[in-house]
Amino acid sequence: MDDVVDRIIHTFGMMRNLDEDGLREARDSVDNYIETLSSAGETDPARLAVYGLAYLRERHSGSPSGVTGC
């Protein structure tokens, strides 16, 4: 599952401008979330990555820094 979490954090890091502490917090929270999904029976890495990204986007809702919506 570490590969899935790495993929999620890498992708999320490209979407958001987070410092090291922000990325560490995101990694910890998504790691717990992916573990929960995995223990519930979801094993497809691509699906887990999509779910993990959606989870982080929801947790960090709002526009990415620098995006004005124009």
Image (cartoon, rainbow, N blue to C red):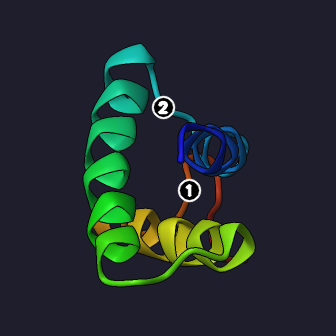
Q: Residue at x 62, y 65 (%)?
A: 68
Instruction: Pick the residue in front: 6 or 1.
Output: 1
Instruction: Report which residue position mark 2 lands on.
Output: 18
Instruction: Report which residue position mark 1 lands on.
Output: 64
Residue 60 in view: no
Numbered disc 1: secondary structure: loop
Q: Depth-wise, is mark 1 or mark 2 nearer the camera?
A: 2
Instruction: Pick the residue in front: 54 or 41.
Output: 41
Q: Residue at x 25, y 53 (%)?
A: 32
Numbered disc 2: secondary structure: loop
Instruction: Pick the residue in front: 23 or 35.
Output: 35
Q: Is residue 52 left or right of residue 46?
A: left
Residue 54, placed above or below residue 18: below
Q: Residue at x 63, y 48 (%)?
A: 66
On-image quarter of the C terminus = bottom right
Kind of residue at badge 1: Pro
Q: Which residue ends up furthest to the top in the rendered image? A: 20
Measured in 3D between alpha carbons, the distance from the residue under mark 1 to the one under mark 2, in whole angstroms, is 10 Å
> What is the x, y in percent for residue 57?
46, 68
How packed is label 2: few (under 14 Cα within 10 Å), some, or many (20 or more)? some
